[in-house]
Each structure stands twice: as structure tokens, then as C-alpha cells.
């Protein structure tokens, strides 16, 4: 085991390249506080890693380069704004190396969909270069770099289920007593996370926003593996903002609920919508109904929790 809990031995693959598989996430609770002076928001963010994955491969190169393939790959930035490139640069700077690698991202997580695809790629590239270079970085050091990259990146490294506080980067691992089955409806186009938070602030202007607190009932439902109880506790304080910016998402939520989902919510900042269902059979039924409804581009079935970033 490496310091991150991922499989594989740091440096074992030498110079041939390292591939890391990293999961998507769904926020089963996203409680958002008021805007802080630094522009961020305090959160009580309950993450669940689900079985949609990107694979990030790093190989030695003459210069830092990013390529991408898969659904909506054309929307992924290939310059140094990509979180995968930034992760490599930060690790290189900390360890006295040149960031000379080719990063190849095989996308399967929806792009700009509120499922932390970009954050997953950042965590994947970080772990891959840690292994490629044999840095020996500790878990805490890697998590520190993740936190510098973005609020969701630490969870992409850790996986499973966790409560994120602060701006989401301070994690407490949560126990989960079973497998939860989900359907994710992928919308046309993305939603900018900063834009959704900006709309949240606009909608709450002049309102005293309470401090975000994790729901005790939701944490208990996770621990027991109780899908019905979890369905009754799901919440997302950004949902109203996402719906304000993209009203058509309400039709998608209604279509999935009508098809038998236990509960429906916008995933993170959207525009992907998430549907909790009883079992794998129900997931297929709801996914088919969502596609037929014409309210989304496609629908994906996944279950969680699953591990975080893993060296293949």
C-alpha cells in the first residue's frame, strides 16, 4: 500500500508510465454557508464516490503536455489550467523536479457536470506522478497539494464516503453499511461552479444563511446502508441556484422520480442530476425512462461507495 491507500508500489513502473483510475462523486448532502471574506463558502459536504471513472496516465516526456479522449473530451482544457497539469506542477515544485510528463486523460466522468471530473483528474495525475517519480510523499503531503488545487480534489484521492468541512477540503472518513445504487442523467452543456455559487449568493442576498451542519439522520442512513432513509435525507443547498440557471433540470428531476427513483437531486453544482434507487434492477428501469423522456442527453448507472484514486 502507498501512503494514499492506493494499490501499487511507488516507482515500481519505472519510466514506462503509470495509470491511475479515479472515481466520480455525488454529494448526498451539500450544506452551504454564506460567502466568506475570501469568496469561498463554508460547507458540510457529504461525498460518496461512485463507479464512473476517469483514467489518468502519465509518461515521461520532453515537456508538460495534456491530451484527452472520451465523451466531451473537446470541452477539457489541454493547457496549464487543467487541474491534472497543475497537480503535476505542484508536485514537481515540491520535490525539485521538472514537470516533464505527458498526461493522458481517458474521460468517462461527465465534463462540467457536478461530479468532480476535473478534480478527479487532478488527484489522478498527482498520484500517478508520485508513483512515476517515486517521491515517497506522505498521504498528508498529497492531501495538502490536493487542497491547494481545489475543494473536491482531496476527496477524489480518498474516495469511499467522507464529510468535507471548511470549503470541503477537510475530510472525515465515514462508515457506509452497504451499496447504494444511482442513476445519473447527463445534461446538454455544463454549468460553471463559480456561476452557481454566485447565483446562490444572489438568491440569498439579505438572508441570514445558517452555518452548514451535516445531517445526523443522513449519516446514520449511510452507516446502516439504508437507501430509503438516505432518500429522505438527501439535500443540496445549491439546487435552487442550479435550477435558476437551468430551469429545464426540473423536468429531468420529475422524469426520474416518476420512473420510480426513491429521491432525486442536482449533483453538486450541476447540471448532472442524481437519482437514488432501490437496487441495480431499478437503476436500469429509471435510466431507460430518463432517456425515453428526452429530458437529458443520456443516463448512466453507477453504485457506491467505491475506492478513491488507485494505481492500476
Image (cartoon, rainbow, N blue to C red):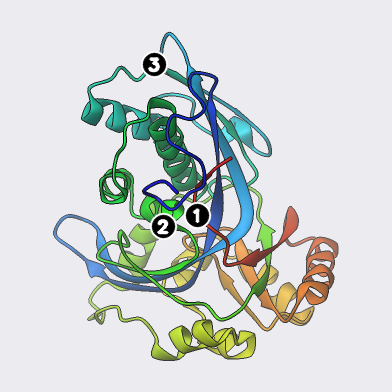
Of the two numbered discs 1 and 3 on the same chain, state the one appearing first in sequence: 3
Quadrant containing the C terminus in the rendered view:
top right
Q: Dividing the picture into quarters, in which one does residue 62 lie?
A: top left
Q: List the residue tagged with mark 1.
A: 308
How far apart are the alpha carbons under marks 1 and 3?
25 Å
Q: Are marks 1 and 2 in contact (CB under 8 Å)?
A: yes
Residue 95 place in picture, x, y as percent: 24, 28
The answer to whether any part of residue 133 appears in the image is yes
- Tag of residue 155: 2
How far apart are the alpha carbons under marks 1 and 2?
7 Å
Secondary structure of residue under mark 1:
loop
Of the two numbered discs 3 and 2 on the same chain, state the one appearing first in sequence: 3
Q: List the residue tagged with mark 3.
A: 100
Residue 279 place in picture, x, y as percent: 75, 77
Q: Residue at left 49%, top 52%?
A: 116
Of the two numbered discs 1 and 2 on the same chain, state the one appearing first in sequence: 2
| Residue 216 horizontal side relative to residue 201, left or right | right
* Residue at the farthest left position: 37
How crowded is the residue under tag 3: few (<14 C-alpha within 10 Å), some, or many (20+)? some
The answer to whether any part of residue 65 appears in the image is no
| Residue 31 horizontal side relative to residue 27, left or right | left
- Tag of residue 70: none
Q: Residue at left 68%, top 39%?
A: 71
Residue 137 place in picture, x, y as percent: 29, 39
Q: Against 260, is 290 above or below?
A: above
Decide which of 261, 86 is in the foreground and name it: 86
Q: Residue at left 33%, top 54%?
A: 151
Amino acid at each position: 500500500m502507498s501512503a494514499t491507500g492506493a494499490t501499487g508500489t511507488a516507482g515500481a513502473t519505472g519510466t514506462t508510465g503509470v495509470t491511475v483510475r479515479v472515481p466520480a462523486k455525488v454529494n448526498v448532502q451539500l450544506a452551504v454557508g454564506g460567502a466568506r471574506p475570501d469568496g469561498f463558502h463554508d460547507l458540510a459536504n457529504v461525498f460518496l464516490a461512485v463507479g464512473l471513472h476517469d483514467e489518468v496516465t502519465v509518461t515521461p516526456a520532453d515537456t508538460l503536455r495534456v491530451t484527452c479522449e472520451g465523451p466531451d473530451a473537446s470541452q477539457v482544457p489541454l493547457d496549464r489550467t487543467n487541474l491534472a497539469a497543475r497537480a503535476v506542477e505542484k508536485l514537481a515544485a515540491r520535490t525539485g523536479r521538472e514537470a516533464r510528463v505527458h498526461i493522458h486523460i481517458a474521460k468517462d466522468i461527465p465534463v462540467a457536470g457536478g461530479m468532480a471530473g476535473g478534480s478527479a483528474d487532478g488527484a489522478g495525475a498527482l498520484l500517478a506522478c508520485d508513483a512515476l517519480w517515486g517521491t515517497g510523499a506522505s498521504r498528508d503531503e498529497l492531501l495538502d497539494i490536493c487542497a491547494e488545487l481545489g475543494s473536491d480534489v482531496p476527496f477524489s484521492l480518498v474516495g469511499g464516503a467522507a464529510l468535507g468541512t471548511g470549503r470541503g477540503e477537510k475530510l472525515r472518513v465515514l462508515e457506509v453499511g452497504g451499496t447504494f445504487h444511482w442513476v445519473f442523467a447527463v445534461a446538454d452543456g455544463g454549468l460553471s461552479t463559480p456561476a452557481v455559487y454566485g447565483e446562490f449568493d444572489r438568491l440569498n442576498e439579505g438572508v441570514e444563511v445558517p452555518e452548514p451542519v451535516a445531517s445526523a439522520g443522513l449519516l446514520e442512513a449511510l452507516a446502516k446502508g439504508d437507501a430509503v432513509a438516505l432518500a429522505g435525507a438527501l439535500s443540496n443547498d445549491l439546487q435552487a441556484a442550479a435550477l435558476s440557471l437551468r430551469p429545464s433540470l426540473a423536468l429531468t428531476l420529475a422524469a426520474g422520480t416518476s420512473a420510480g427513483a426513491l429521491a432525486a437531486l442536482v449533483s453538486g453544482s450541476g447540471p448532472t442530476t442524481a437519482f437514488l434507487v432501490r437496487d441495480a434492477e431499478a437503476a436500469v428501469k429509471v435510466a431507460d425512462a430518463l432517456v425515453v423522456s428526452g429530458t437529458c442527453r443520456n443516463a448512466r448507472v453507477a453504485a457506491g461507495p467505491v475506492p478513491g484514486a488507485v494505481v492500476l
